Image: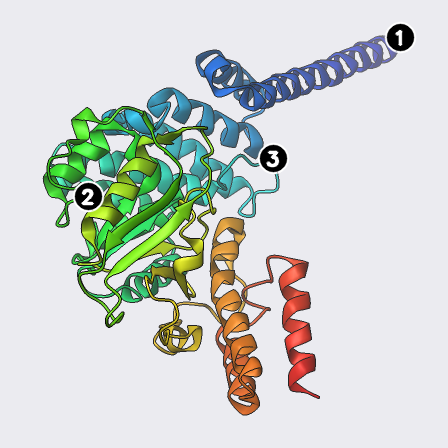
């Protein structure tokens, strides 16, 4: 009788525990889905403080859920920095907490398969420590900035192939050039190299996204080796939106390979914001007008036509950079010339944990795109043997079993190039 009674009690307890576990898991999932919906709202209506609290509750019942760690890290980061204008006040203790959640996410699933916001966990690590470093630089604390960048690398950001790519990118720029970059996956590794390795500090790096923030503009005004604005224009006086009339824009050409051509003009037919330029767009435009090609200007790849103020037809493709060329009819440096000078030695012999970063895989495919475009150029010129040699170099230096193709479209493009070479 006692045996039956205890068996009955045990069954009840087991059912209760099973039901409780299911309810707990359901509650964690509900809180996570609620957080995801909050991130999809318009930025001005998001409540990231409440979202972070809800995700902490979810994490208490599901501590090994990588997706909860990932979204909690992003929610806490929104609270910590909110937008680019707050980066200078980024809090070290809060950054360390955010980093712990991202590191835990990575340790649970090195190749994160959950829903992703703009950055994967590895890139987000680089962004939060990079933001902290930039805040220190804005306060004229270079040693603290170096420490923050090094913290990011030691915790899993700024992977060696990415840093090598950014070294190649900087080496694509001429001496004392100005490099406009966009996107955390370019900006922070580039700043890392200049801050921690003193690599190519002659190149003035300008993050166009940060130009809309007061602190970054003031930082550039104090530290930039090349003035961003024409004499008489003050960064303090530039509003967030600047009235601008579309049409032809022109400037002088003081130096460069243009020979007798002394003026450069291009058309800005329309603006995204109606009759207004964003402050970042205005500063970019004023720099180009004031620089008059005394210093060469480069852009990282990935800018849209609007972001480039319709300069896209005047950009010379350089694999990882685009050079502003006021006389495109002149002989240009080809993609193959850039590729020959690139060092690509940090890739392992096979896929490894570093390629769990989908953002890094996408970035490394820029090499492959550069090779493909260079091969196409050689085929068009009838230099088939040179094109075949470049195809062999691409497959040797960027093998697909190490760096997977990031799109079927790129794979099809390369396959068609091979067909052309085998005819």
What is the number of the mark on residue 114? none
> Mark 3 = which residue?
115
* Tag nearer the camera, 3 or 2: 2
- The span from disc 1 to disc 2 (Cα, nearest Å) is 89 Å
Q: Quadrant of residue 418?
A: bottom right
> In the visual, does 254 lie left or right of 408?
left
Circle 2 SS class: loop
Name above or below for residue 133 compared with residue 41: below
> Mark 2 = which residue?
228
Circle 1 SS class: loop
What is the number of the mark on residue 1? 1
Counting from the top left corner in percent of width and height, residue 144 is at 16, 39
Name above or below for residue 116 compared with residue 83: below
* Tag nearer the camera, 1 or 2: 2
Is residue 47 in view from this perspective? no
Q: Residue at (52%, 55%) from the top-left corner?
A: 362
> In the visual, does 279 lie left or right of 419?
left
- The span from disc 1 to disc 3 (Cα, nearest Å) is 53 Å
> In the visual, does 101 lie left or right of 66?
left
Q: Residues within 10 Å of mark 3 (few under 14, many from 20)?
A: few
Counting from the top left corner in percent of width and height, residue 213 is at 28, 29
């Amino acid at each position: 009788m006692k045996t039956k009674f205890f068996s009955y009690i045990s069954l009840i307890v087991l059912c209760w525990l099973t039901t409780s576990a299911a309810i707990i898991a359901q509650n964690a999932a509900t809180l996570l889905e609620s957080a995801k919906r909050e991130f999809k709202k318009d930025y001005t209506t998001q409540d990231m403080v409440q979202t972070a609290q809800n995700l902490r509750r979810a994490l208490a019942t599901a501590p090994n859920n990588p997706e909860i760690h990932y979204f909690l890290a992003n929610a806490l980061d929104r609270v910590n920095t909110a937008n680019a204008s707050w980066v200078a006040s980024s809090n070290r203790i809060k950054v360390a907490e955010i980093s712990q959640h991202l590191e835990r996410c990575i340790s649970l699933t090195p190749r994160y398969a959950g829903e992703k916001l703009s950055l994967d966990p590895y890139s987000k690590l680089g962004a939060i420590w990079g933001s902290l470093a930039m805040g220190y630089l804005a306060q004229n604390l270079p040693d603290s900035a170096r420490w923050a960048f090094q913290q990011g690398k030691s915790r899993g950001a700024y992977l060696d192939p990415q840093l090598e790519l950014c070294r190649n990118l900087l080496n694509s720029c001429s001496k004392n050039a100005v490099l406009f970059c966009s996107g955390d996956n370019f900006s922070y590794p580039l700043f890392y190299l200049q801050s921690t390795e003193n690599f190519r500090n002659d190149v003035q790096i300008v993050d166009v996204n940060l130009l809309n923030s007061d602190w970054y503009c003031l930082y550039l005004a104090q530290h930039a080796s090349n003035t961003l604005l024409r004499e008489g224009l003050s960064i303090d006086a530039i509003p967030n939106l600047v009235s601008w009339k579309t049409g032809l824009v022109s400037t002088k050409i003081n130096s460069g390979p243009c020979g007798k051509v002394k003026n450069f003009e291009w058309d800005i037919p329309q603006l995204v914001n109606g009759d207004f330029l964003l402050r970042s767009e205005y500063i970019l435009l004023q720099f180009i007008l004031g620089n008059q090609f005394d210093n060469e200007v480069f852009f990282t790849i990935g800018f849209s036509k609007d972001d480039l103020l319709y300069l896209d037809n005047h950009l010379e493709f350089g694999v990882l950079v685009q050079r502003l060329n006021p006389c495109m009819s002149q002989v240009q440096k080809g993609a193959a010339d850039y590729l020959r000078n690139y060092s690509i030695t940090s890739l392992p012999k096979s896929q490894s944990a570093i390629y769990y970063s989908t953002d890094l895989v996408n970035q490394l495919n820029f090499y492959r795109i550069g090779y493909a475009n260079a091969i196409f150029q050689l085929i068009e010129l009838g230099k088939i043997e040179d094109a075949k040699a470049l195809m062999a170099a691409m497959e040797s230096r960027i093998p697909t079993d190490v760096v997977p193709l990031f799109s079927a479209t790129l794979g099809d493009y390369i396959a068609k190039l091979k067909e052309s070479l085998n005819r």
